[in-house]
Amino acid sequence: MKKKIKFLAFIVFAVIIWLSFSNFKKEKPKETLNLTLKGTNIITLKSDEKYKEPGFEATYGNVDLTKNVQIEGKVENKEGTYELIYKIKYGKTKAEAHRFVKVQKPKEIIYKDTYDNIDNTSRGWWSGNKKDGSRPAGGADINELKKYNAYFLGPNTKTLYLTFDEGGNETYVKEIVDVLNQNNVKATFFFCLHYMKSNEELVAKIAKDGHTIGNHTATHLNMPSLATSENFKKYLEEITLIEQEYKKITGKEMEKVYRDPRGEWSYRDLQIMKDLGYRAYFYSADYQDFKEESTKEKALAELSKRIHNGAIYLIHPKNKGNYLALDSFIKEAKKQGYTFDLVKNIK
């Protein structure tokens, strides 16, 4: 009898040990408190730029604690290095992360003496407007322009580039954007300052939809006349005011895409824009759509007969005929095997 009791006791003891071991193996690992910074841990800004927090995340297992993160420190708009400390506490657990923001003085842009050696004759642009499908000559040698990061034609492929020059507040830009989006076509819009200030929501939408907004200067002046040491401050202002307004509206830096107002340009003007990081874009297909309003039929005929490989179209959105003809023109061009692209992709 005693032997049976001892045996049963041994069995019970073994079962208890086995159950304990099984529970030990099944025990879940402890959760950890994670604090992760988005973006980089070291950010460099110019003193004229506003710091924008890239963001962060805090989790404990499946629990989102991001809203509980506390940030110590601040970034000021003066030169120096600023430390931001991100802290989170959950129960007895703590986590901490650090970000450093370096604020530097903006690099001063000055007029170079070498600019005086570059031709500053103000020229008007013309495109040749060939109507037989061939690639036209332009207002300057295509290879010479490339030295200044300036273009009036894309590669010799069946690709078209639609560009629209604002031309005032009474335009069909909104309707044109709708047509482009419906046809899955991206285009480039060159805006001046007053238009951007008066149409902030539309400008933001155009950028969000993947179109390019190019710099057309603040007040549409003759830029070669400002490309001198005496007027250089005004020259820069015409460019930077557009950049600042674009960033204010979209929160992003403006793409370095430029078109001279009125088609008036000089080699010195192009060199300065190149030094500012811009690529300038003229055009190889246009008609005098700025003089009077065209009918849909006339606009469609004018756009269609100027089609050629790599064509950069200049279109004025204030002309209702252009807006009415755009859908038909895009569809017909696609039937002919053409695709559409942004001028910024021309190399």
Image: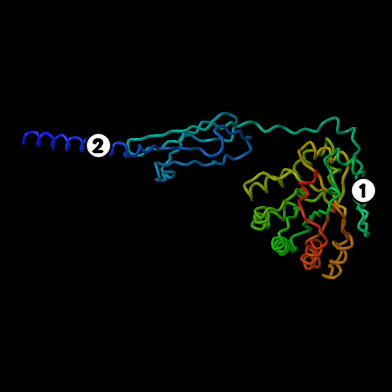
* For marks 2 and 1 on the same chain, the one whose residue lies earlier in the sequence: 2
Which of the two marks, 2 or 1, is nearer to us in this view? 2
Q: Position of residue 217 (x, y in %)?
A: 77, 48
Q: How many marks are shown on the rendered structure?
A: 2
Instruction: Tell me which amino acid carries mark 1.
Output: Gly
Choose between 103 and 127: the one closer to the eye: 127
Q: Pick the residue in front: 156 or 272.
A: 156
Q: Which residue is mark 1?
A: 139
Residue at image coords 86%, 53%: 309
The reply to whether discs 2 and 1 touch (Cβ–Cβ < 8 Å) is no
Mark 2 is surrounded, within 10 Å at the Cα level, by few (under 14), some (14 to 19) or many (20 or more) other residues, namely: few
Under tag 1, what secondary structure?
loop
Crowding at dot 1, Cα within 10 Å, few <14 / some 14-19 / many 20+, comes out as: some
Q: Amino acid at mark 2?
A: Trp
140 left or right of 184 in image: right
State the SS at label 2.
Answer: helix
